[in-house]
Image (cartoon, coloured by chain):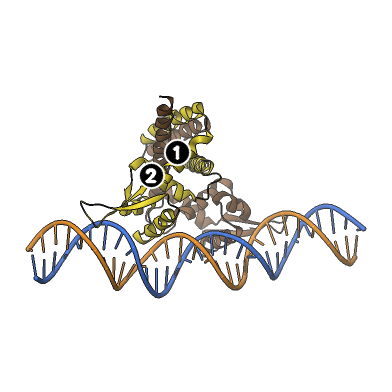
Chain colours: A yellow, B brown, C blue, D orange
DNA sequence: ATATATATTTTAATAATTAAAACATATATT
DNA sequence: AATATATGTTTTAATTATTAAAATATATAT
């Protein structure tokens, strides 16, 4: 009996988690509609925007890839003139990846497909969603 | 003035969406801890479990990859004896990918690291999260 | 000075993905 | 029934992405 409850909960978790991931992936897809950017490229641009730039190692950690992979990811976005590398003066070993003004514009533009009201709705719901998820993870 | 509100909402959306994605990714990472399976392999196993098997084309659609990539993904999981291919009798062109009993066991085991209570909590929260996300997407 | 540690890039090899062709089966047309 | 067309999966060859390890550059400690 108790086992059935357990199994039922596991099924709910799988189902809901997959739907949540799918919905958020679809949202990012929607954002990047018409852009020739991959999901990860777009996510990196957003990350750079909200963090005000990131170190290569931070990017590697975030995407769970090796530093070499970060170099190649960033080379491509740099070639598109969306990001640029800035050597830090305090510690000249570190490279900070930052959005160019073109990159900033691109990120802002992505959201122009939504109305003002829709953006307000989405912002509020996502805040609540994140708060709710914070209670378990 | 109105532009600032807009920009503020966009920033909230980016920040919250990235955190939501990160949290759900971390959850899947936690699930697969100790397993030598990639995120996508694990997600495919869960999908097969909740859908009771999937056609190759459905998998390609879900992951947004070509049919050739599905063949190779599935070859690997088949080699691990986690899934198997079943030709459908109604239409012998289609292959249905299904969990083996080993695969079923593996999926069930993934959740054993959580207590009964924790699973109940997670299930409830995820249902609410998904409901909430449904209001905007 | 020298040694050791840290951050990024380069390199060569491996793995994953794609586009297109091949194969197998189904459905429609003559 | 024979032929043509469409659909679903696999194979193939080429491209792209990722890795592990070496190389480069800078920092910190002895």
The residue pinned by badge 2 equals A47
- Is D28 situated above or below A109? below
Give the residue at x 33% y 42%.
Answer: A51
Q: Helix, strand or loop at disc 2?
A: helix
Q: Chain of mark 2?
A: A
- Check the picture and name the quadrant holding the C terminus of chain A: top left
Q: Nearer the viewer, residue D12 or A115?
A: A115
Give the residue at x 46% y 27%.
Answer: A120
- Is A14 situated above or below A91? above
Q: How far from the left and from the top, in percent, is residue A33?
A: 55, 44
Give the residue at x 48% y 39%.
Answer: A109
Can the viewer see residue A87?
Answer: yes
Occupied quadrant, residue A128? top left
Can the viewer see residue B114?
Answer: no
Q: Residues within 10 Å of mark 1 (few under 14, many from 20)?
A: some
Q: How far from the left and from the top, in percent, is residue A24?
A: 49, 40
Q: How far from the left and from the top, in percent, is residue A84?
A: 36, 52
Give yes or no for contact between labels 2 and 1 (Cβ–Cβ under 8 Å). no
Q: Nearer the viewer, residue B107 or A71?
A: A71
Q: Chain of mark 1?
A: A
Q: How far from the left and from the top, in percent, is residue B63?
A: 54, 51
The residue pinned by badge 1 equals A108
Mark 2 or mark 1: which is in front? 1
Q: Nearer the viewer, residue B133 or A107?
A: A107
Relative to residue C10, is residue B43 drawn left or right?
right
Give the residue at x 64% y 58%.
Answer: B86
Occupied quadrant, residue B36? bottom left
Q: CA distance from mark 2 to mark 1?
A: 13 Å
């Amino acid at each position: 009996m108790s086992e059935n409850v357990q199994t039922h909960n596991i099924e709910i978790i799988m189902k809901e988690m997959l739907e949540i991931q799918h919905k958020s992936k679809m949202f990012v897809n929607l954002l990047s509609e018409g852009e020739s950017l991959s999901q990860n490229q777009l996510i990196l641009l957003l990350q750079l925007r909200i963090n005000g730039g990131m170190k290569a190692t931070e990017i590697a950690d975030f995407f769970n890839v090796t530093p070499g992979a970060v170099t190649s990811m960033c080379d491509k976005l740099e070639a598109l003139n969306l990001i640029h590398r800035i050597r830090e003066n305090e510690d000249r070993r570190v490279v900070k990846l930052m959005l160019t003004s073109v990159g900033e514009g691109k990120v802002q533009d992505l959201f122009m497909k939504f109305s003002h009201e829709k953006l307000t709705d989405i912002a509020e719901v996502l805040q609540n969603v994140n708060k709710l998820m914070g209670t378990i993870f």
